[in-house]
């Protein structure tokens, strides 16, 4: 079963990048040793930073910061 964090991160990234979002999550998770289907609360800071860096390329600095902060905020729910 996919965790709530995995679902939320996927929602954010597919909203920003379409189908590419899923691929980006899988790649970043693999690089960080995180199971993309089982993202845990403690994974969010590392993953947010990694996905923010990816977003620099696709959406610029403002978009990257917004996405990183949105993913970080998931851990405060």
Image (cartoon, rainbow, N blue to C red):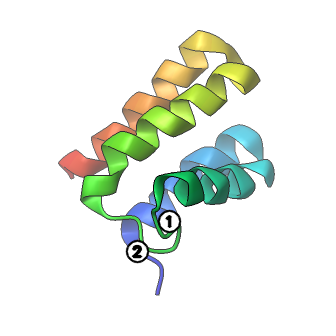
Which residue is found at the position 44% from the left and 33% from the top? 49
Q: Looking at the image, can residue 10 be seen?
A: no
Residue at left offset 68%, top offset 49%: 24
Outermost residue on the right side: it is: 19
| Left or right placement of residue 64 versus residue 76 in this view | right
Q: Secondary structure at mark 2?
A: loop
Which residue appears at 56% of the width and 46% of the height? 12
Give the Cα separation between the discs numbered 1 and 2: 6 Å
Give the image location of residue 33, x and y in percent: 47, 61
Q: Is residue 22 left or right of residue 63?
A: right
For mark 1, give the secondary structure: helix
Establish if 71 lies above or below 40.
Answer: above
Who is closer to the viewer here, 64 or 53? 53
Residue 65's x, y, as percent? 48, 20
Report the residue that reaches farthest toward the top. Answer: 61
Q: Quadrant of residue 5?
A: bottom left
Q: Is residue 15 visible?
A: yes
Q: Is residue 35 left or right of residue 59?
A: left
| Residue 6 sits above or below residue 65 on the image | below
How crowded pointer 1 is (Cα within 10 Å; few <14, some 14-19, many 20+) is rated as: some
Q: Which residue is mark 2?
A: 3
Q: Residues within 10 Å of mark 2 (few under 14, many from 20)?
A: few
Above/below status of 63 relative to 28 = above
Q: Quadrant of residue 53?
A: top right
* Residues tagged 1 and 2 counted as in contact (Cβ below 8 A): yes
Task: Provide residue 11's location: percent of width, then percent of height.
Answer: 57, 55
Which label belongs to residue 7?
A: 1
- In the rendered image, residue 54, in percent from the top left (x then y), is placed at 64, 32
Name the residue at 53% across, 67% down: 36
């Amino acid at each position: 079963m996919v965790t709530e964090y995995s679902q939320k991160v996927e929602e954010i990234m597919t909203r920003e990048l379409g189908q590419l979002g899923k691929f980006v999550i899988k790649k970043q998770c693999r690089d960080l040793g995180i199971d993309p289907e089982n993202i845990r609360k403690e994974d969010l800071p590392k993953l947010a930073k990694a996905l923010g860096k990816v977003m620099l390329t696709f959406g610029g600095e403002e978009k990257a910061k917004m996405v990183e902060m949105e993913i970080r905020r998931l851990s405060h729910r």
